Image: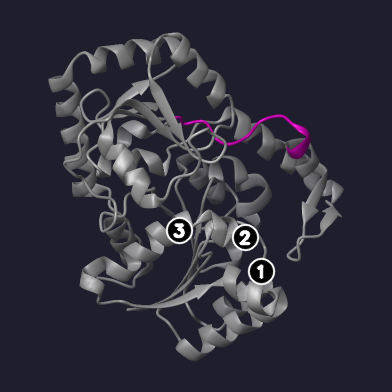
C-alpha cells in the first residue's frame, strides 16, 4: 500500500525541540509495519512551509498527492497551516484521506467538528467525541486509541535508578502535585520542558521508563486559566502566524474548549508507552481506561493526592507485586495496543486491507 504521510517532522515545527510525537510514533510505525512492505511518501509540511512559505507548501502538497496517487493520504493536523481547501481538493479527486484528531476531549467544539467533513475518514481517540460526531451527522468517524510504537519503544534490562519519575510538561497543577509528593518524603524526578531536569530525547525517555520503579502519568489535559487561554477565546493565529480577532460566533465554542481543557481527563499515549517499555504505570484515572487494561492487575490508578501517596509507598515496598503488574501491563500492550495493530484495524475499516 502507498501512503502519503502529511504531518510535522519536528515538535511544534521547531528542529531545536527534536522530532515530533507523530514522527516518532505514526511515521515510524507506518514505515516499519508489516516488515516495511508499505511505501510511505513523506511530506513534512512544517519543513516544506519553512522553505517555500505556507501558500507554496499547499501547492506542493496538491502536486505530490496528484502525482503519487497514494492508496491513502494520512494527515495529523492540529491547525490550518495545511488549508481546508487543499484537503478538500485532494478528497474530491477521489483519493482516500484521513486525519488523526488529537485532543478531541477539548478541541472538538472549536476545531475537529469543522475539519472532519473535509476528509474521507476522521480518527478520534475520545469515545464521547465519537458520539458528538454522530450527532452532527458525520458518519466518516473511526474510533481508535493511542498506542505504542513497539519498533522504537523497548523493554530493557537497565537497572532501576529512580524510585518515581514523571516525563511531561508541568502544566495544570502538576508542579503543585509533585511538590506535595516531595513534602511527603517521596523522591520524584521530573523531566520535560519547564522542569529543572529539562527536556529529554525520545531514547532518554525510554531509558527513564525502564529505569524507574514507578512511572507516573497525569491524565489531566493541558488547560489552565491564564492570559493566554483567555486570549485564545477572542483571538486566533492565521496560517502565517498573524494574530487576528476571532469571529464572535466562535467565542462561546472557544470558551467551551478552554473549560474542557481544564476540567477533562483523558487517556494519554503515555499509558501505552510506559507499559510498552515494561514500566510500572501509576496513572490518574480517565474514563474508559478499563477498556484497555485491567486496573489493579496491569496498571494502577490514583484519584487524588492522598491515594497517590499511599500507592507510591505501597508499591515501592512491594517489589514482587509491582514487577508482576508491570509485566502484565507490558504483555497486554504488546499483545493488543501497538500502533501496527491500531493501523491495521483502521485500514480494514477503510476497506484498504482485508
Q: Residue at coordinates 37% horizontally, 29% vertically from top-left?
A: 165
Task: Give the label on residue 115, or none.
Answer: 2
Residue 65 image point, x, y percent: 52, 83
* Figure quadrant of residue 210: top left
Q: What is the quadrant of the N terminus in the image? A: bottom left
In-front residue for pair 301/197: 197
Q: Is residue 7 visible?
A: yes
- Marks 1, 3: nearer the viewer: 3
* Figure quadrant of residue 281: top left
Structure colour scheme: one colour
Residue 323 image point, x, y percent: 16, 27
* Magenta highlight range: 218-228
Horizontal relation, residue 84 to residue 318: left or right: right
N-terminal of the two: label 3 or label 2? 3
Q: Residue at coordinates 58% horizontally, 71% vertically from top-left?
A: 47
Structural distance between the alpha carbons of marks 3 and 2: 19 Å
Residue behind mark 1: 84
Structural distance between the alpha carbons of marks 1 and 3: 20 Å
Task: Give the label on residue 22, or none.
Answer: 3
Horizontal relation, residue 337 to residue 63: left or right: left
Residue 272 image point, x, y percent: 32, 42
N-terminal of the two: label 1 or label 3? 3
Q: Secondary structure at mark 1?
A: helix
Q: Residues within 10 Å of mark 1 (few under 14, many from 20)?
A: some
Q: Mark 3 and 2 residues: CB-CB less than 8 Å, in contact?
A: no
Residue 127 among magenta residues: no
- Marks 3, 2: nearer the viewer: 3
SS majority, magenta: loop
* Figure quadrant of residue 159: top left
Q: Secondary structure at mark 2?
A: helix
Q: Is residue 285 visible?
A: no
Q: Mark 2 and 1 residues: CB-CB less than 8 Å, in contact?
A: yes
Amino acid at each position: 500500500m502507498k501512503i502519503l504521510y502529511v504531518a510535522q517532522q519536528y515538535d511544534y515545527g521547531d528542529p531545536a525541540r527534536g522530532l515530533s510525537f507523530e514522527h516518532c510514533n505514526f511515521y515510524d510505525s507506518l514505515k516499519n509495519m508489516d516488515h516495511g512492505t508499505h511505501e510511505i511518501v513523506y511530506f513534512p509540511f512544517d519543513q516544506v512551509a519553512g522553505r517555500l512559505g505556507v501558500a507554496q507548501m499547499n501547492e506542493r502538497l496538491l502536486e505530490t498527492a496528484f502525482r503519487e496517487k497514494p492508496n491513502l493520504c494520512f494527515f495529523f493536523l492540529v491547525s490550518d497551516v495545511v488549508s481546508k481547501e487543499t484537503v478538500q481538493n485532494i478528497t474530491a479527486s477521489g483519493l482516500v484521506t484521513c486525519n488523526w484528531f488529537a485532543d478531541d476531549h477539548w478541541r472538538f467544539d472549536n476545531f475537529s467538528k469543522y475539519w472532519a467533513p473535509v476528509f474521507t475518514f476522521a480518527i478520534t481517540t475520545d469515545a464521547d467525541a465519537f458520539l458528538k460526531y454522530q450527532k452532527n451527522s458525520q458518519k466518516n468517524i473511526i474510533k481508535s486509541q493511542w498506542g505504542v510504537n513497539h519498533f522504537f519503544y523497548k523493554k530493557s534490562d537497565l537497572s532501576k535508578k529512580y524510585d518515581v519519575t514523571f516525563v511531561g510538561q508541568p502544566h495544570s497543577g502538576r508542579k503543585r502535585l509533585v511538590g506535595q509528593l516531595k513534602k511527603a518524603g517521596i523522591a520524584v524526578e521530573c523531566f520535560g520542558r519547564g522542569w529543572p531536569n529539562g527536556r529529554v530525547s525520545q531514547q532518554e525517555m525510554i531509558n527513564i521508563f525502564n529505569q524507574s520503579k514507578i512511572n507516573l502519568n497525569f491524565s489531566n489535559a493541558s488547560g489552565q486559566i491564564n492570559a493566554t487561554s483567555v486570549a485564545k477565546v477572542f483571538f486566533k493565529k492565521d496560517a502565517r502566524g498573524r494574530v487576528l480577532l476571532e469571529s464572535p460566533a466562535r467565542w462561546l465554542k472557544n470558551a467551551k474548549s478552554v473549560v474542557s481543557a481544564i476540567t477533562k481527563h483523558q487517556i494519554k499515549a503515555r499509558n501505552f508507552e510506559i507499559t510498552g517499555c515494561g514500566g510500572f504505570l501509576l496513572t490518574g484515572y480517565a474514563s474508559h481506561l478499563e477498556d484497555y487494561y485491567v486496573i489493579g492487575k496491569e496498571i494502577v490508578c490514583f484519584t487524588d493526592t492522598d491515594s497517590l501517596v499511599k500507592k507510591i509507598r505501597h508499591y515501592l515496598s512491594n517489589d514482587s507485586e509491582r514487577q508482576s503488574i508491570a509485566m502484565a501491563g507490558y504483555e497486554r500492550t504488546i499483545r493488543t495496543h501497538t500502533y501496527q495493530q491500531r493501523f491495521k484495524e483502521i485500514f480494514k475499516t477503510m476497506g484498504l486491507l482485508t
